[in-house]
Image (cartoon, grey):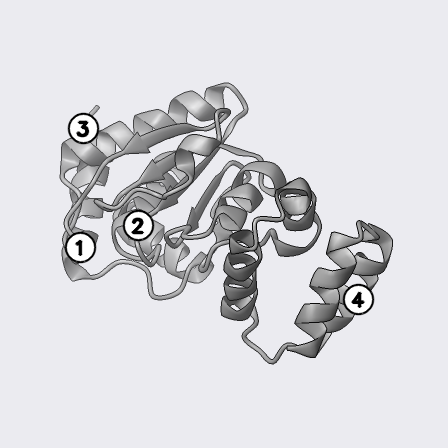
Amino acid sequence: MIALHTMLGILKKADMTKFRSLSKMFIRYIPSPSHYILSGFLQIYQRLNIAHYSVSFRRHFMTHPPANFSWVSKSVAGFAFPREKCELEYIVNDAQITHIITMCHEVPTYISDFKSVKHYHLPVEDLTAASLPVIQKAIEIIKQAEAKNEKVGVHCQLGRGRAGTILACYLAYKNNFDADDAIKELRRLRPKSIDEEQEKAVKQYVKSIKQL
């Protein structure tokens, strides 16, 4: 708490050099996992309404990926629901993702703040598999983005089931995998992805593209 008050005091005085140094020392002593502590600190900070430094503060200290963030190719990533604005800032500014596909009913709160991002809402019920038309639409979004050398992020709540279904289908399409190999590769890259019902959806999609 003393460290928190000290950091905020320095921030108000606009001595950003000292603030950066102190914040790094403060973060070093945060017990693992620090993700939730950092998110909580950001919420406290934002409520103090120190608007003049908010952008600089998040950019230098608080930007971090959402949970379960990883790449499955150079242009496609999966992740859990981005609840904090700083997580979206990481996705857009650090990872340079310009297309976000949301597979759950809830939409990220701050998504409309990022004008450079194209957002696609393809909601699927939790613990179920996406239908073939939904999968095909998601893959088409990815195809069009890759054709422009742009990056895509896919998420649901945990980034495992609904998002995992799309990612497995993408791997099958991208690498000409059969369904089993696509699922195996996805689980290597992103452990605990997709369940039995979602495996069936991947197989259905792979069967559909093999028939073309």
Task: Tell me the residue that label 3 is attached to.
Answer: 211
Mark 4 Cα shell of 10 Å, populated few (<14), some (14-19), many (≥20):
some
- Name the residue: 53% across, 61% down: 44
Q: Nearer the viewer, mark 2 or mark 4?
A: 4
In the picture, the disc for residue 22 is: 4
Label 2 – label 4 distance at C-alpha: 36 Å
Label 2 – label 3 distance at C-alpha: 29 Å
In the picture, the disc for residue 126 is: 1
Residue 173 locus on image (x, y percent): 34, 35
Q: In which quarter of the view is residue 55 placed?
A: top right
- Name the residue: 21% across, 23% down: 212
Mark 2 Cα shell of 10 Å, populated few (<14), some (14-19), many (≥20):
many
Whether 122 is drawn above or below 16: the answer is above
Mark 1 Cα shell of 10 Å, populated few (<14), some (14-19), many (≥20):
some
Whether 211 is drawn above or below 164: the answer is above
As shown in the figure, which amino acid type bears the numbered disc 1? Answer: Asp
- Determine the secondary structure under disc 1: loop
Q: Nearer the viewer, mark 1 or mark 4?
A: 4
As shown in the figure, which amino acid type bears the numbered disc 4? Answer: Leu
Label 1 – label 2 distance at C-alpha: 9 Å
- Name the residue: 30% across, 55% down: 157
Q: Is residue 21 visible?
A: yes
